[in-house]
Image (tube, rainbow, N blue to C red):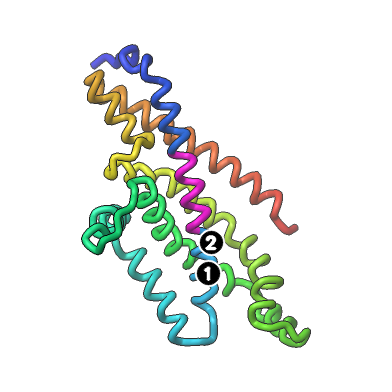
Amino acid sequence: MMLDFSSIVPYWHMFVTGAVFTVKASILAVTLGSIMGILIGALRVVPVKPIKGLAAAYIYVIRGTPLLIQLFLIYFGLPSLGINLPAFTAGIIGLSINSAGYVGEIVRGGIEAVPKGQWEAAKVLGLSYLGTMRHIILPQAIRNMLPALGNEFVTLIKESSLLSTLAIAELTMVGQQVRSVTYASFETFIMVGLIYLCLTSFTSIALQLIEKRWQVH
């Protein structure tokens, strides 16, 4: 079989637009998810069992259910409760909530990796729990978490393809639109896959540079 990409060349601008939209959605989702995840991860280590239990239950449920089902619950399920969200808003909320579950576990691991002596030193200095977490523990933990957080961002770029199920015009949805016009299914989705590969490769390289800059020798 001979591949012929000439039929999809006139739609190149659509691929670019879809890729830009995918990057924007991923950055927004990973930012919100990281904020939520840091909070959830911090709650996982507080010395209050009910709070720890709630945070652990959130992570358990989010990591144990498919992202697609979570998106459907938000976009198709909430209207039955009288809550109607635009597709883009529902998609970003779904991605953020899902990402927060994974980031929360990453944060928990990063916090627990900080030597206990740091907690004891902060206690001697008279710092409160929140002060210790904010000024001493989290800055060190985030440095330990960078590789895992980078992997989460790369994963989120790929998982954003599920937004196409909500008819959001990200890269995968654009690919489906181009395929429906050109009937060049193989060529179209090879192009989509290559663009995703470029996005994830560029992101991985950028994150590796950041890790090296933050590395403590």
Left or right: 43, with 60 as reference point:
right
Magenta region, mostly helix, strand or loop? Answer: helix
Figure label count:
2
Q: Which residues are magenta?
A: 22-33
Q: Position of residue 178 (x, y in %)?
A: 29, 24
Q: Position of residue 176 (x, y in %)?
A: 27, 30
Up/down of 100 relative to 13, above or below:
below
The tag on residue 35 is: 2
Picture quarter with the C terminus = bottom right
Callout 1 secondary element: helix
Up/down of 178 relative to 108, above or below:
above
- Residue at the far right in the pictured view: 125
Distance from the alpha carbon under mark 2 to that under mark 1? 7 Å
Q: Position of residue 208 (x, y in %)?
A: 61, 46
Left or right: 217, with 182 as reference point:
right
The residue at the point 37 percent across, 75 percent down is 57
Up/down of 28 relative to 4, above or below:
below
The residue at the point 74 percent across, 82 percent down is 121
Callout 2 secondary element: helix
Q: Position of residue 69 (x, y in %)?
A: 26, 56
Q: Residue 14 occupies which quadrant of the picture?
A: top left
Kindly identify which residue carries mark 1. Answer: 39
Q: Amino acid at mark 2?
A: Ile
